[in-house]
Image (spheres, grey):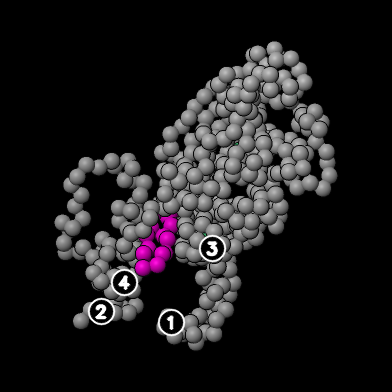
């Protein structure tokens, strides 16, 4: 008879920690080491980055749509002044709701004046950047952002980005459509070059010759002079200070919604960053030894961007399907709405990542919060855990598991 229950050795299939029959996972190959031999061509450098895929936990079962990608493997489009690389749904099928761009502008480097069909949410990861835009009433904003700050441009509203001194700006954009590409934007120089000269002259009330030196091909990213004083630029652009919604938000300086010995969670959505009407985010910081607790999101897919450290995440899907993979700085993950997940810090350093959602607000269901708000006998009937032990579980959502 197969051993069952918590007293069974964990290498026996259909036991605690090894639930499947037939068993899946390396623990089930004891006595048959030939099962693990890998004889074909391999790339040990890449393989070393995915210990949880080479040797998945015995609790993993079956397979599901791959939920890992990375800017580290994305082709870099480089021009004088900076570069960009992107991950769209074309490369990463699961990423339906969000596409991502990682861009760098040298000091003075300009991402040319443009607009596009989707909203643009962004987080600054290094350096400083000057941004310009117009709101729906035609009123301008000119702002400087730095590491940990966000900006948000609603779909269709025009904008520019320019790196500031001394080291330029690096940032990650999230568009609220997985198919949006950084190469699919409406560029100022393209429109000028492809409008009849007499129409340009008529529109601006000047002679055609005024436009004879405009670029015939778009600039996209190009070098420029480092901008001067912010206030002078704001005045020159006609910025008026009033009741309008700010287009930037200092996320890394905001008050956490969860904070304990295991880390913290800071949130920006339309409740505290009103202009961000279609993208919500959580900045998650996890100390070594801790993890983002078991939870899911009912309102949107989660698009993750890993800022620092190393992690593993298991995604729990119907079926059941459960699969674990590894994440490092520059990587991107996607968890479809309602699929259960945790994110565990697997390194000796702080883990930091962003959860980005195509929604006007942040929303989650915490497993611990749910189970602690049910009649205890109902939970006991499912899990065979006595009510007095259940009473020691966390009584609320913790966000991050506190260190013991
Ligand atoms: Mn843009
Ligand atoms: Mn999540």
> Which labelled disc corresponds to residue 19?
4
- The answer to whether mark 1 and mark 4 are in CB contact below 8 A is no
**Crowding near pointer 4: few (<14 within 10 Å), some, many (20+)?**
some
Which residue lies at the image location 77% right of the left edge and 21% below the top edge?
A: 205
Tally the marks.
4
Which badge, 3 or 4, comes first in the chain's sequence?
Answer: 4
**Do the CB atoms of the residues marked 2 and 1 lie less than 8 Å apart?**
no
Whichever of labels 1 and 4 marks the residue nearer the N terminus, that label is 4
- Residue that appears at 73% across and 42% down: 135
Q: Which class describes the residues within 10 Å of circle 3: few (<14), some (14-19), or many (20+)?
A: many
Q: What element carries label 3?
A: loop
Residue 163 placement (x, y as % from top left): 63, 30
Cα distance between the residues tagged 3 and 4? 26 Å
Residue with the mark numbered 2? 3
Does mark 3's beta carbon lie closer than 8 Å to ligand 2?
yes
Question: Label 1, on which residue?
Answer: 382
The residue to which callout 3 is attached is 297
Residue 334 lies in the magenta-colored region:
no
Say whether marks 1 and 3 touch (CB < 8 Å): no
- In front: mark 4 or mark 2? 4
Q: Is mark 4 on a helix, strand or loop?
A: loop
Q: How far apart are marks 1 and 3 (CA)?
A: 23 Å
Q: Tell us which disc is closer to us: 3 or 4.
A: 3
């Amino acid at each position: 008879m197969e051993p069952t229950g918590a007293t069974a050795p964990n290498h026996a299939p259909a036991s605690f920690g090894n639930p499947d029959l037939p068993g899946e996972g390396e623990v089930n190959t004891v006595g048959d080491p030939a099962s693990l031999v890998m004889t074909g061509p391999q790339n040990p450098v890449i393989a070393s980055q995915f210990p949880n895929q080479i040797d998945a936990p015995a609790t993993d079962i079956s397979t599901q749509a791959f939920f890992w990608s990375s800017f580290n493997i994305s082709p870099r489009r480089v021009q004088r002044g900076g570069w960009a690389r992107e991950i769209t749904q074309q490369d990463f099928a699961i990423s339906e709701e969000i596409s991502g761009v990682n861009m760098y502008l040298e000091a003075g480097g300009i991402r040319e004046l443009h607009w596009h069909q989707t909203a643009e949410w962004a987080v600054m990861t290094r350096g400083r950047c000057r941004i310009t835009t117009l709101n729906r009433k035609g009123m301008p904003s000119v702002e400087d952002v730095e590491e940990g700050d966000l900006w948000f441009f609603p779909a269709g509203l025009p904008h520019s980005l320019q790196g500031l001194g001394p080291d330029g700006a690096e940032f990650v954009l999230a568009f609220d459509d997985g198919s949006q590409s950084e190469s699919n934007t409406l560029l100022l120089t393209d429109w000028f070059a492809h409008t009849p000269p007499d129409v340009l002259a008529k529109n601006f009330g000047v002679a055609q010759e005024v436009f004879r030196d405009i670029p015939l091909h778009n600039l996209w990213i190009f070098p420029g002079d480092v901008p001067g004083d912010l206030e002078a630029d704001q005045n020159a652009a006609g910025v008026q200070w009033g009741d309008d919604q700010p287009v930037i938000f200092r996320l890394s300086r905001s008050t956490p919604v969860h904070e304990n010995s295991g880390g913290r969670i800071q949130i920006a959505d339309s409740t505290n960053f009103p202009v961000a009407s279609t993208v919500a985010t959580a900045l998650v910081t996890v100390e070594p030894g801790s993890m983002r607790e078991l939870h899911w999101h009912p309102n949107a897919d989660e698009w993750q961007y890993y800022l620092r450290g190393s992690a593993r995440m298991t995604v729990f899907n119907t079926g059941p399907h459960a699969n674990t993979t590894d994440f490092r700085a520059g990587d991107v993950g996607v968890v479809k709405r309602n699929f259960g997940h945790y994110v565990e810090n697997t390194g000796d350093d702080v883990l930091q990542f962003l959860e980005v959602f195509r929604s006007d607000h942040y929303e989650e269901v915490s497993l611990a919060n749910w189970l602690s708000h049910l009649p205890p006998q109902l939970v006991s009937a499912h899990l065979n855990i006595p009510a007095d032990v259940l009473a020691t579980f966390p009584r609320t959502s913790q966000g991050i598991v506190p260190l013991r």
